[in-house]
């Protein structure tokens, strides 16, 4: 503004000219008055514009509340013949907060283009994907295992290595492929080298995502995402890409998919076309929710194709679990008992013997004799009845494995490197 310049510039006034002094003083007063008027007009204009913007924002928010297809993840119970879906309250608060910000600012009404993500990029390395898969699994593999890793290579830590170790403890001749661009690197090789040095067949391969979804219902979904026709939502993109990638890789090649926070405790050789229930109704004993942390399916199995189709058609990036556990539950509920679908649903004890709310108890050391007896009984029960334990990493990743705990016992019994157990 000119006012600042007027006050900082030195003014030389001739001492012997009162007329000049009066003229200059009048000029200064006139300029100050003019600037004050202009400033007030600007402020009033800004206030009026801000008021208009506020009113527009309120109108947009009201319109969004009426027309939006984004549903807040509130607790709900949907009862059907074989399914009761209970919303996980732990994830609802954080998502409601994120969606609240989007609602407040009118964000989300407009579609956002899928952000660039390393896992989606195609280059000379990913073009070799299919050939590398065929070559790797043509090595006398007892079973074909897949995991996915979309985070940074430095985040692949002790917990994830333990999951890989447990695969080879139960399947010394198994083959484990980790679908990951970040792990398919020099640093990733160094992480896996202790297993390779012991003769275990493990490899990290950068996936060719467009190839994996080609000729599946997810191909059009990915195109719509990239073009901005679909909104990726507020859920971390990596989570939903992992939900899809496990499906398309099993559909293309068949095998066993495991989350990287799953401790294998016995051989999977007897399992075929299998999915596990996360929870059951205590009265009817019918399953109430399935989970997709462990999947065992043949190549081109029709149920897996239905999973992919449901993912693409009903995708919602704003609902926690909608494209994962709830998705497989919706599909199985519709096709269960229909001809042409041959699969098995195992009870929670098979893969999810401890609920995510109670997983912390497995990490605690016994405080007295009663605690020691409980730990011993729990370890023996798991050894007899479960194929493995899902650790619900979101809840347990920061927990320390205490000496004498159930987790200490399980890790010691199912490791092959068996180092740094207490740092997991």
Image: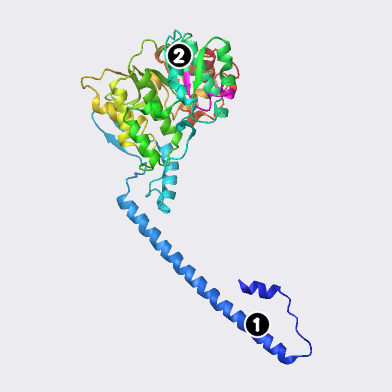
Query: Residue 128: horizontal and vertical position, in percent?
Result: 46, 22
Element at badge 1? Answer: helix
Cα distance, mark 2 to mark 1? 86 Å
Quadrant of image for the C terminus:
top right
Q: Which residue is mark 2?
A: 135
User: For residue 306, what is the image quadrant?
Assistant: top left
Specify whether residue 86 is in view.
Answer: no
In the image, residue 174 sits, relative to residue 322, either above or below, namely above
Q: Is residue 358 left or right of residue 275?
A: right
Query: Residue 413: horizontal and vertical position, in percent?
Result: 52, 12
In the image, residue 413 sits, relative to residue 95, either above or below, namely above
Report the colour scheme: rainbow
Q: Nearer the viewer, residue 89 or 250?
A: 250
Q: Which residues are magenta?
A: 177-188
Task: Tell me, for residue 43, which label it has, or none.
Answer: none
Q: Nearer the viewer, residue 234 or 220?
A: 220
Q: Which residue is mark 1?
A: 28
Q: Earlier in the sequence, mark 2 or mark 1?
A: 1
Specify whether residue 12 is in view.
Answer: yes
Q: Is residue 51 magenta?
A: no
Q: Nearer the viewer, residue 46 or 285?
A: 46
Q: Residue at x 51, y 75 (%)?
A: 41
Binning the other alpha carbons within 10 Å of mark 2 as few (below 14), some (14 to 19) or many (20 upward) gives few
User: For residue 408, what is the image quadrant?
Assistant: top right
């Amino acid at each position: 503004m000119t006012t600042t310049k007027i006050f900082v510039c030195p003014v030389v006034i001739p001492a012997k000219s009162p007329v000049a002094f009066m003229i200059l003083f009048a000029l200064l007063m006139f300029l100050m008055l003019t600037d004050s008027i202009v400033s007030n007009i600007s402020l009033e204009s800004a206030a009026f514009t801000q008021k208009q913007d506020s009113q527009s924002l309120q109108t947009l928010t009201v319109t969004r509340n009426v027309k939006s297809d984004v549903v807040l993840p509130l607790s709900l119970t949907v009862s059907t013949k074989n399914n009761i879906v209970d919303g996980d309250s732990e994830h609802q608060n954080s998502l409601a907060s994120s969606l609240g910000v989007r609602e407040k600012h009118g964000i989300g009404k407009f579609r956002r283009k899928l952000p660039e993500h390393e896992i989606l990029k195609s280059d000379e390395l990913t073009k070799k994907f299919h050939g590398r898969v065929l070559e790797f699994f043509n090595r006398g593999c007892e079973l074909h295992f897949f995991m996915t890793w979309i985070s940074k290579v430095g985040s692949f830590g002790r917990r994830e290595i333990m999951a890989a170790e447990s695969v080879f403890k139960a399947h010394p001749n198994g083959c484990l492929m980790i679908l990951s661009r970040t792990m398919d690197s020099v640093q990733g090789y160094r992480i896996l080298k202790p297993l390779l040095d012991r003769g275990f067949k493990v490899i990290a391969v950068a996936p060719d995502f467009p190839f994996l979804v080609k000729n599946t219902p997810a191909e059009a979904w990915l195109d719509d995402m990239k073009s901005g026709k679909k909104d990726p939502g507020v859920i971390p993109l990596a989570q939903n890409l992992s939900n899809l990638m496990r499906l398309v890789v099993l559909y293309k090649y068949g095998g066993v998919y495991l989350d990287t926070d799953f401790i294998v405790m016995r051989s999977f050789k007897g399992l075929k076309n299998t999915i596990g229930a996360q929870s059951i109704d205590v009265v009817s004993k019918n399953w109430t929710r399935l989970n997709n942390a462990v999947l065992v399916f043949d190549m081109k199995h029709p149920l897996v194709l239905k999973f992919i189709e449901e993912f693409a058609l009903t995708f919602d990036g704003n609902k926690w679990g909608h494209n994962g556990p709830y998705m497989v539950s919706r599909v199985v509920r519709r096709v269960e008992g229909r001809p042409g679908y041959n699969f098995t649903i195992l009870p929670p004890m098979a893969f999810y013997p401890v609920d995510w709310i109670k997983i912390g108890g497995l990490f605690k050391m016994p405080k007295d004799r009663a605690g020691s007896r409980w730990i011993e009984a729990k370890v023996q029960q798991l050894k007899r009845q479960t194929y493995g334990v899902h650790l619900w990493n979101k809840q347990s990743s920061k927990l320390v494995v205490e000496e004498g705990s159930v987790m200490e016992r399980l890790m010691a019994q199912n490791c092959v490197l068996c180092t740094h157990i207490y740092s997991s």
